[in-house]
Amino acid sequence: MSPLSARASSKGNRKSLLPQRSSVLEEGELDDYDFYSSDHLDKIFDVVIEIQEEYDKKRLEDIKLQQSQKADQEKVPKALLNPEVQRQIKKQKVYKPYFLVTLTVIQVIIMFLELGINWVKLGTPIDLNTENFNIMLGPSTSVLIHFGARWVPCMRSGFENESISCIDGVDPYMNVTVNSQVFGICKLSDLCGMGMAENTVPNQWWRFITPIFLHAGIIHIITNLLFQIRVGFQMERDFGTLRIFIIYSICGIAGFMFGAEYTIQTPSVGCSGSLYGLIACLLLDLLLNWKLLIKPVKELFKMLFVIIISLGVGFLPFVDNFAHVGGFVTGLITGLIFLPSIKFNLKDRIIKKTITIISIPVLVIIMSYLIISFYSSDARRCEWCKYANCLPINGWCDDMI
């Protein structure tokens, strides 16, 4: 029997090979050769078995690794496996949130100044007047106006000859009696402050900008800054300081312009219009990069829920829901212009570039319309619109036009 057939046989058959091996040795060819000994064959077969077991173990590990990689690939969106998409993602920079950090500090300082001035004027940092109680736990209306709240009578002509009722903290120059009730009448220059001279046409256009730095009270600034710090800071890290500065500023100004069309006699403050612009950018970022998300529908519903809840806050005093809507719409347009996005292929690149080019004149038209409409003689008089901005309780909507 050949050596190959001997190695293929079982241990029992190996013993039958010994006589043949002996006969070969008797012929004197290899007297000292014991290759076919039982112990030697056992060792050979043990080594073969160990090698086979090691091979099977290694192959099993490779199979498990392949299955794990396949499972991971199934969890990761296919778009992320695209080398071009991976290249674009790797090129993205991480920025420092210089703009929003600085702005947040300024907003907090101004809030303390508001409370301090209110303390000097009325003897308390928070307006505790039972008739005009500031639900936001902040200063009186007069302090907010003097600090630069958006209040239309201080911003354009048409109000300089009107008799305006005094508000807390402003002394009247005359009193009038209506139905046995005495009302103080104030000069517009005294109400507006900020350098307005008596008997001049109001033109404090900067009140579209200054309210972004103001807040109606402690509750107001806490809610806004929680979102600004938690979400806004990260957005500035992702998109860059210059982009966020432009979007934040345009949305805040446009929001107050839009609100001025409908809430003429109501002072408005806060950075909510700007923050709604950032929310719009988040929504836009989700839609533009839909293919990169594992569960985009879930993320969309979460964002819509936040938007709806935030709109409810706009019914409180000094908070302008129209500014929210204006900031949100403007945020969508500015986001299309300034936000970076992943281009998944040539067709996607062309579509997104085209949308960006179209959005630029659209933004210019909207801003121009808001400016022209505000300064035109035709003021918006919408009786029911005020209920989209306030709840008809505690007299919150009584003074709104």
Image: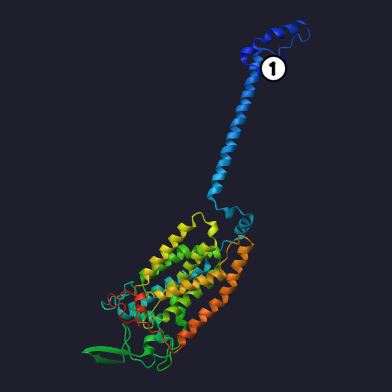
The residue furthest left is: 180
Instruction: Return the residue nearer the eye: 337 or 236.
Output: 337
Q: Is residue 240 visible?
A: yes
The residue furthest top is: 26
Residue 44, relative to residue 32: is it above or below? below
Indicate left or right for 196 with 342 as reference. Answer: left
Q: Number of labelled discs?
A: 1
Instruction: Return the residue nearer the eye: 35 or 115.
Output: 35
The type of colouring in the image is rainbow
From the image, tell me which residue sits under label 1. 5
Indicate the quadrant where residue 325 lies: bottom left
Q: Position of residue 1 (x, y in %)?
A: 72, 13
Instruction: Return the residue nearer the eye: 236 or 43.
Output: 43
Q: Position of residue 40 (x, y in %)?
A: 66, 15
Q: Position of residue 208 (x, y in %)?
A: 46, 80
The kind of residue on which mark 1 rests is: Ser
Residue at figure coordinates x 49%, y 55% from the top left: 295
Indicate the quadrant where residue 125 lies: bottom left
Q: Position of residue 341 (x, y in %)?
A: 57, 64
Residue 15, relative to residue 151: is it above or below? above
Q: Is residue 148 visible?
A: no
